[in-house]
Image (spheres, helix red, strand yellow):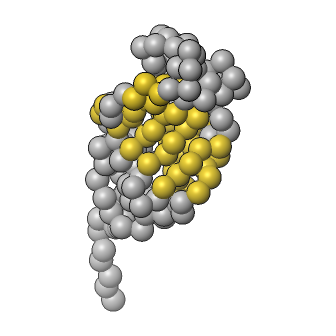
Amino acid sequence: ASASNLLTVTLSPDCDVAGGSLVTLSGLTGSLTGSGSVGVNSSGVGLISASATWNETSGALVLETINAGLAAGGVYEVLFVLRNGAAEQGSPSISVKGSVLSVDGPFFGEGYFEAMDKAEGNAEGVSGGAAPLLIVLPRFLVRGVGQ
């Protein structure tokens, strides 16, 4: 709880996503990271802005494609850090939506939110701990004392 959490998102669009388009990740709830700008690293260097807009209340992160944008069928990894909340929670349902800028004019093709596949493996000794934003408070399984 309350630890920094490096999240990795993998995206592969079914169409070209021009520079200036938006990709919204939704459902990233339970984080203590305050609303504002969040640093982003991506495998497509120069294709996704190094800064994204984060909304703590809604749990939404909005990424912007830049330059040539993303190519249809390409696979892109996006990494960012959110701080875990202080309370236990299950991994929330996370979805993604594209608002794709048309190359023929200033119009967005609005996608719809689609559920994302989540990691299910173990991490840090926690069963299912690889699931994003799963928060487990540490405790001792044996708590004995004597004299």
Location of residue 28 in the rendering, given as x and y in whole percent from the top left corner: 40, 49
**Is 1 drawn above or below residue 26 in the view shown?**
below
Location of residue 111 in the rendering, given as x and y in whole percent from the top left corner: 37, 28
**Is 52 drawn above or below residue 67 in the view shown?**
below
Tag count in the figure?
0
Residue placed furthest toward the bottom: 147
* Quadrant of the frame with the C terminus: bottom left
Pick the residue in front: 57 or 134: 57
Residue 87 figure quarter: bottom left
At 66% from the left edge and 18% from the top edge, which residue is drawn?
68
Residue 113 figure quarter: top left
Pick the residue in front: 32 or 113: 113
Location of residue 24 in the rendering, given as x and y in whole percent from the top left corner: 45, 38
Q: Is residue 52 left or right of residue 134?
A: right
* Quadrant of the frame with the N terminus: bottom left
At 54% from the left edge and 60% from the top edge, which residue is drawn?
35
Residue 43 visible in rendering? no
**Is 5 drawn above or below residue 89 in the view shown?**
above
Pick the residue in front: 125 or 43: 43
**Is 65 drawn above or below residue 17 in the view shown?**
below
Pick the residue in front: 47 or 82: 47
Location of residue 18 in the rendering, given as x and y in whole percent from the top left corner: 58, 20
At 59% from the left edge and 44% from the top edge, which residue is drawn?
52
Q: Is residue 49 left or right of residue 22?
A: right
Residue placed furthest toward the top: 73
Residue placed furthest toward the front: 105
At 44% from the left edge and 29% from the top edge, which residue is drawn?
98
Residue 21 visible in rendering? yes
